[in-house]
Amino acid sequence: MRFYNINFAFEKKIERDPNAPKTTQGLENKVLKWVRMEKGLWDSAFAANGNKPVALDLANTPFGDADYIGNHMLNVAPNQTIYDAYDAIIFLAPVEQLRQTAISDAIFTDDFKLELERRFPILYTETQ
């Protein structure tokens, strides 16, 4: 199950200074950007449905047939689809109507921002 709207696209691996701070996921060695699924076609489909919240089974649908985009996209099998990774999607609202941070455009509630403050020292230690 995944929540639709936007997703991280992992564009390529890069070499960084080995002494620079590191994340446990190795994200500092990848070029990332936020993308809309199928270049906005999913947005258009949900808009045509009145932007009503909906959950969709991905099997045998154009949504499921979309190219896989996500955290494993740099090493997926050729022609891997969203359905190969997820069974269903949940659409809540257009991304512009969801809470966003100005820094990353990611969707964070105030409570989750506090959780991120708790996690940060765990993920980014002085020895990394």
Image (spheres, rainbow, N blue to C red):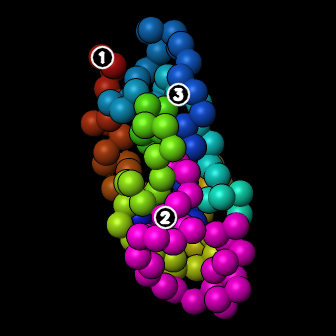
The alpha-carbon separation of the residues under discs 1 and 2 comes to 41 Å
Residue, disc 3? 30
Does the magenta run of residues contain 67? yes
Question: What numbered label is drawn on residue 8?
Answer: none
Disc 2 is placed on an element classified as helix
- In the rendered view, tell whether residue 22 sits above or below residue 91: above
Does the magenta run of residues contain 97? no
Q: Tell me which label, 1 or 2, sits earlier in the chain.
A: 2
Residue, disc 2? 64
Q: Nearer the viewer, residue 6 or 65?
A: 65
Residue, disc 1? 127
Q: How many marks?
A: 3
Tag 3: amino acid: Lys
Residue drawn at 57 percent across, 27 percent down: 12
Q: Tell me which label, 1 or 3, sits earlier in the chain.
A: 3
The quadrant in which residue 1 appears is bottom left
